[in-house]
Amino acid sequence: DDRGENGDGEAYFKLSEKKRVTVRKFKNMILIDFREFFTNSDGDSNPTKKGIALQPEQWNKLKEFISDIDEEIENLK
Amino acid sequence: DDRGENGDGEAYFKLSEKKRVTVRKFKNMILIDFREFFTNSDGDSNPTKKGIALQPEQWNKLKEFISDIDEEIENLK
C-alpha cells in the first residue's frame, strides 16, 4: 500500500519507493514532512537529511499554487 | 509577490519567506523542487541542502494524497 503508519504512529504517504510525506505533531506544531528514506540492511526504512517540513500555513500555500505549478510543468514538457 | 523567476529563468513559488517550490528542467527531467533558502549579506537568496526534488509522477501522487493529508492534519488539531 502507498500509505501507512510509522513506528511513532504517524501517518505517511508514499510518493515513490524512497520518498514519503509524513504528517506529525512536534512540540505542539503540526508538520507535513517531505522526505527521502533509505532502507537499512534489516529492511527498515530510515529518514535521510534530504527533505523539508512544511507548516500547515505553508502547506495551504502549496495547495493554492498547484494549478500554477502544473502549468509550469506543462510549459517545460 | 509570492511567485517569481530566478536567475536561471526558472519559475518559483514562495511557501514562506524562506521556502520555495521551483519548477525546472535538469538533464531533460522535470523537477518540482521544494527547498529552503537563506539570504546572504548581499541580500541574495541561495538554496540550502534542506529540500527534496519531486519528479512529475511523484508530484501527481502528492496531489492524489491531498485530501488524506488534510484529513490527517485535522486529526492532529
Image (spheres, coloured by chain):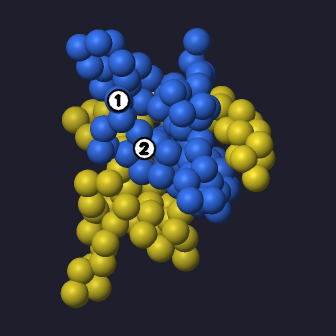
Chain colours: A blue, B yellow
Residue at (22, 35) in percent of width and height: B27
> What's the amino acid at mark 2?
Ile
> In the rendered image of this protein, does residue B8 appear above or below residue B32?
below
Residue at (76, 53) in percent of width and height: B77
Q: Is residue B33 visible?
A: yes
> In the rendered image of this protein, does residue A32 appear above or below residue B12?
above
> In the rendered image of this protein, does residue B7 appear above or below residue B61?
below
Residue A22 x %, y %: 54, 38
Q: What secondary structure is marked by label 2?
A: strand
Say which chain tag 2 marks: B
Residue at image mark 2? B32
Q: Across the whole image, how many numbered discs are drawn on residues?
A: 2
Residue at image mark 1? A46
Residue B25 x %, y %: 32, 42
Describe residue B75's horizontal placement relative to residue B14 as left or right: right
> What's the amino acid at mark 1?
Asn
